[in-house]
Image (spheres, rainbow, N blue to C red):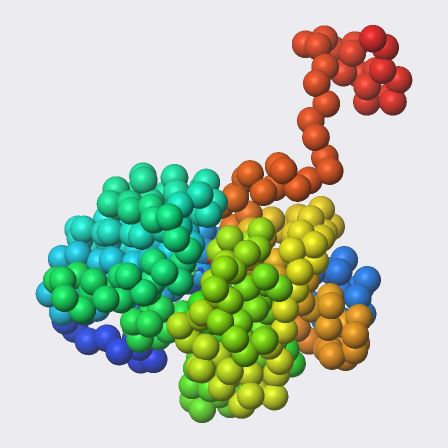
Amino acid sequence: MRWQGLIQEYKEFLPVSENTPKLTLNEGNTPLIYLENLSKEWGVELYVKTEGTNPTGSFKDRGMVMAVAKAKEEGSDTVICASTGNTSAAAAAYAARAGMRCIVVIPEGKIAMGKLAQAIMYGAEIISIEGNFDQALTMVRKISETEPVALVNSVNPYRLEGQKTAAFEVCDQLGGAPDILAIPVGNAGNISAYWKGFKEYHEAKGTALPKMHGFEAEGAAAIVHNRVFENPETIATAIRIGNPASWHLASAAVEESAGKIDEVSDEEILAAYQKLASTEGVFAEPASCASIAGVYKQLQNGTIAKGSKIVAILTGNGLKDPNTAIECSPIKPVLLPNDEEAVANHIRGVVHQ
Ligand code: F0G
């Protein structure tokens, strides 16, 4: 039967009733791809869950369909969020679909071009502040307390409810939980949601539990260093967050699962970003590749054992951030005249001027 989206497919695991709007863009049901080349090279069994195949190109759709549906059910007509880009794209899309107003607050100059294009196209009201994500989040949290707007950042518990469904899918696709779940960490909502999902599914179906390995960017590694980063910096703008809202939930997930919270540098992220695309044909945005970079790092230093079954979450689509791809790639288009012979000669490795 046709996939009906998360609210319908997972209703027995979600806080929904007949009164909940049947909102969907057919989110969820994303592929779990076995990485043949990297698995062989690294001596592991490595899969990626491509959350960039969701309707707006990131995992945020899972949480947003729930948060927006519940806001509508509870009588709101406006949603608001702070965002490094993906949350705003998802909020804008689901609000449009639900016939609601959407206000997004973003850090000026620090969101990827594709994400901004999405918020514009879906008709959000966009406020760009000269501040970072953490400051934008503080602002919208306060505003939502006094104004008639529903906050749809991941501090809204419905967001984690929707996002936990990805863990269900991993278990169904793999026939049980992997040994290790590798995931990028920014505001720390998603790692918390996955852990909740794995626990609930294990309770219901005996699917076992993975070790949760979360990866922050080195310049924004608050949980790793147990201190707020006032001025977080990383090329992976999606996770450029210095004071994660779900810090304690994420720490609990790592502790309860006997996992690890770790950091990866921008160089490691970019290397993983390029390697994943060029050796496996999978293009994920830089922040997503923190999971792959982290797996590689931990295989080298022995934190992850050879032979492990690993699922790495690729949280967003590579097309979200074309600028980083073009700026960071060593491959540049070769400029030739509009001439068949010139092109043929170039391909043969003999360029005649
Ligand atoms: N990967 C991507 C592509 C993201 O957009 C985010 C978060 C994360 C990972 C981290 O997830 O915050 O649950 O730990 N993006 C948010 C946003 C902050 O506004 O789009 P998290």
Q: Position of residue 180 (x, y in %)?
A: 63, 78
Residue at image position (81%, 22%) is 347
- Residue 274 appears anywhere in the view: yes
Left or right: 13, with 215 as reference point:
left
Q: Position of residue 115 (x, y in %)?
A: 42, 45
Question: In the figure, 25 relative to 12: above or below?
Answer: above
Where does the N terminus fall, quadrant-wise? bottom left
Task: Please state if 114 lies on the left or on the right of 66 as rendered.
Answer: right
Q: To which quarter of the image does residue 116 belong?
A: top left
Seen at 66% across and 41% down, the residue is: 328
User: How many circles with numbers are drawn on the protein?
Assistant: 0
The quarter of the picture where the C terminus appears is top right
Observer able to see residue 276: no
Task: Quadrant for residue 308, please give it.
Answer: bottom right
As drawn, 334 above or below 303: above
Give the left or right position of residue 321, taking residue 145 as reference: right
Residue 166 position, x and y percent, is: 46, 70
Residue positioned 32% across, 65% down in the render: 138
* Percent of width and height locating residue 195: 48, 80
Left or right, 20 with respect to 183, comes to left
